[in-house]
Image: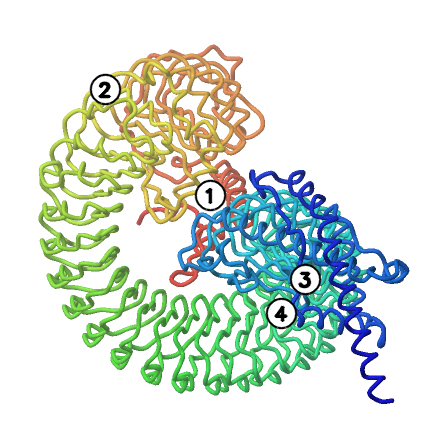
Amino acid sequence: MEMIRTMLSVVILLLLASDLTELLHHRLQADAQEHVQFYAGHDSKILGNDQLDWPADISLENDEVSVLIQEQYSKSLEGTDKRSVETESVERNDFQDEGLPTSPEPDESLQRGRGGWRREARRSMLQTQGSVDIDRTALLEFKLAITGDPNGTLSNWDKNNGDFCQWTGVTCSNNLTKRVVGLNLTFCGLSGSISPMLGTLKLLTDLSLSGNNLTGSIPPELGQCTALSILKLDGNNLAGSIPPELSQCRNLTTLNVAHNHILTGQIPPQLGQLQNLVSLLLQDNLLTGSIPSTIGNCTNLVNFAGNNNNFTGEIPASLGNCTKLEGFVFGYNNLSGIIPPVFGQLQHLSVLYLMNNSLTGEIWFLGNCSRIFLIHMEYNHFTGPLPHDFGECANLTQIFIKNNELSGAIPPALGNCTKLFNVGFSANKLTGTIPASLGNCPDLQSFQLDDNNLTGVIPPELGRLQNVQYFYLAGNNLEGTIPASLGNMTGLLQLHFQDNPRLTGGIPSELGMLPNLKQIIIYNASIQGHIPDSLANISSLEYLVINDNQLNGTIPASLSRLQNLISLLLQNNELTGSIPSALGHLANLQSFSVKRNKLEGPIPSTLGGLRNLTSLDLSNNFFIGLIPQELGNLQLLKTLVLSGNSLSGTIPDSLGNCSALVTIDLSNNTLIGGIPTSLENCTNVTRIRLGNNHLGGDFAAQLNVGKFKSLEILSITNGSFTGRIPETMADCINLSFVDFSRNQLSGTLPIYNEASLPNLRVLALRYNKLEGPIPAWIWNLTALQVLDLSNNKITGDFAGGTMGLSQLKGFINSKASASFLLGSSTLYDENLQITVKGTDLVFTSNLFLLTAIDISGNMLGGIIPQDIEVLKELIQLNLSHNSFKGNIPSNIGTISPLASLDLSNNQLDGEIPQSLQLLTYLANLNLSNNYLSGPIPQGRHLDTFTESSYSPGNRGLCGPPLSRLCTVAPADNTTQYSSDQSIKSFSDLFSIPGFVLGSCIGFSSVLLVFLFWDSVRNRWRLPSTIAILSSRLEMPNRRR
């Protein structure tokens, strides 16, 4: 009986095998032509001219039949599991999309009776074979589009290699269908484009081509890969826009097109249909437009990044629907508006990266994001206080909200965030004190609270932060002393306490115990006492910048042990003694400044050993002796400033070896001799200041100025130089300041091309022996602000050239002056003497505010040109002691900024123009010693001037302040007073009420503009060397 059962089973199996073989045979034959039609209809290149020639019969090996029977038998016994059903459904739909016939349902096949299973098997095999050919062809088309494969990654992609599942980067399904489900060719160095044929890989779930050099656009055909789950195209050079067709890939979880750099267009709103999307990464491209509100429909979104693009508009509140969102990264864009408060409800939010946008509003709600650990929102316009409940964010490690407009106090609860790694609140408007509780954050490495309005003392508890590396408290109103406990910050690298004027006490000697400290920056404070010797123990120290304090005592010779020191800035203190010669052993020193101290003695020759020195400033001390020849060894030296001392002897020839020099300032010493021709080797020089010495000789013969093509400032004032003004100076097209005053230069003014010296702002040639007419090129200096040719022997008239005075844009256009004020500091530290009624006024550090024309004390004649009224920004005009005739220009009163007008000692006649009443800033008026007549204009500012403004001379004038009444016939006006009549009193020099009122109004307005114009003040803030210079804006001081 048992044997009979066995035989029946064998017979049944043989019958089933026979039926299955027949089924496969019929299905292959029935569908072959349909596949041919599909290929021919979709792309003729796939088949070429070949036709499919299917065999008349297909026989299967016994093991293949057994596998098929076993699979079908297992399904009939166990039922189709969920995963198999889904796979079968995808394949069935795939065949339908391709236009291929699908197999009937199993029940329908079973109803066909004997032979049904065989036909169904044949049909399934044919479908599989057709899909395999599509996948193979798509892969070969992808390879054809690749133009570069430096690593040979695709070398085994050969059409003769039938099993493409073994090709590099290709992953196939594990069942009999052998369809392509994955293509991973990341970081293979491939170049070329992405073939649209990849869109025929219907079962593709992972396409990863990151980190190659692919170009072209993203094919819209990829949207046909409906099974796609991962699409990674980042790190290429793809252009064009993101195809909206990708929204058809409803299974997509990762879409990464970041770091392509030239990808343009907007985020397609259709991407909001990808409800399975987890990561949407778009950073480092040129994408524009706003963030679509439809992205809020991607409720499974976890990571959304689009930093370094050109996105605009507001952050959509609909993102609050993305409750799983962990990372929102959109820094370096142009986003505006507020951060939607619904972000405070995103309980999974951990990374918020929004730096460098234009976002506004308050951020109080961020304290509700309890899982957040990284906040970067610097360089925006956020206002209001910091969240008081930041202490609830136990995982917070980094918080940077620098350069905003936050106000209020730093929450003490922030000290509860014990995992804090970086804190950055710089450049806000925070007030109050520094919470001592921040000393509870042992992992803190960066502590940046600089440039706020913080007050109070530096908490000693902060000394517990042993891991802190960057400690920035600069630019506040902190007071008290620097805590000695900071000596416990053994990990400290940089200490910045500058710009705290109320910070007092000494430099703690305990800082000498910080072995890793590289920077000590404490300038512009009120630090007192000596420089501690213990600082010499900080062998790693590179920057010691403690200028603009109240330090006294001597410079410790022990500082010579700081062999890593790069910058030693001690200027503007009260240091005494001499410069230790041992400092010449600081082999790495690049900047050394001790200017404006009380140091004395000779300059050590050992400074010539500082071979890396680029800047040396010893000005305004009491140094004596010669300039050391050894300074010529400093071949990297760019700035040499020795002015304001008592140095003697000649200028060393060796300075010509310092070929990198940019600034040479030896002014205000007692140097003798001439200028060494060796300085012509310093062709990069931009500033030469040699004035106020005893230097002399033929200037043009000593120095070929034309070799200094970059020269901006040239000053040899108060010397004994002779000869003519150099013809080659016209080659210095960058010249902005020329002062040859008080020498013995002679001859006529040089004849330059009318386009010469286009950047010249100051031309001062006063008190020389120059003669001849004023050349036309001077009236074409469009940048000129100060012209001083006084006290020479210049003849001719004041004609202003062929174009009149209209080319003097520096006196006409206020915008030109403002542009210079914001764009250049060339004249900011220059001094210039201007004469007002025989008295020299010294303009210091505010020369850029001055506009003046002084051609007094010459032999000029003719009339004052009527177009002088075009000089709308002129502040001082002195034409005295010449032979001008005719009337005073009637509209001269329209030059509204005019503060000083001196037309005395000429031959002017006629009446005083009524327009002078408009000059409300006028502080000095001198019309004496002319032939003026008629009533003196009254009212407004003119009532403040005294008789000395009109007399002596002008015997035809009448009315106040003169005693002559206009009702009396005018006396004979032909007798003129001597032009050298002495002035006895202050009232003869100035109209006291006029001077006081005009000075107060004029200079106060300038001072207020300067003090409250932040962009101007910040322009000259030099953070590591000099304190804020804007506070030193001063009224002109009388020269002693």
Judging by the rendered image, the residue that carries numbered circle 2 is 773
57 sits left or right of 786 in the view: right
Amino acid bearing label 4 = Ile
Nearer to me, 1034 or 407: 407
Q: Quadrant of residue 865?
A: top left
Relative to 280, say whether 911 is above or below. above
How many other residues sit within 10 Å of disc 3, few (<14), some (14-19) or many (≥20)? some
Return the x and y of residue 291 as percentages of the image width and height.
Answer: 71, 50
Amino acid bearing label 3 = Thr
Judging by the rendered image, the residue that carries numbered circle 3 is 177
Amino acid bearing label 1 = Leu
Q: Secondary structure at mark 3?
A: loop
Relative to 203, say whether 399 is above or below. below
Q: Secondary structure at mark 4?
A: strand
Relative to 843, say whether 392 is above or below. below
627 sits left or right of 668 in the view: left
Residue at 44% in and 33% down: 875
Q: Residue furthest bottom?
A: 2
Give how far apart the Cα atoms at labels 2 and 4 are: 68 Å
Q: How is the image coloured?
A: rainbow
Query: Do the CB atoms of the residues marked 4 and 1 lie less than 8 Å apart?
Result: no
Residue at 49% in and 55% down: 160
How many other residues sit within 10 Å of disc 1, few (<14), some (14-19) or many (≥20)? some
Going from N to C along the chain, the mark reached first, 3 or 4, is 3
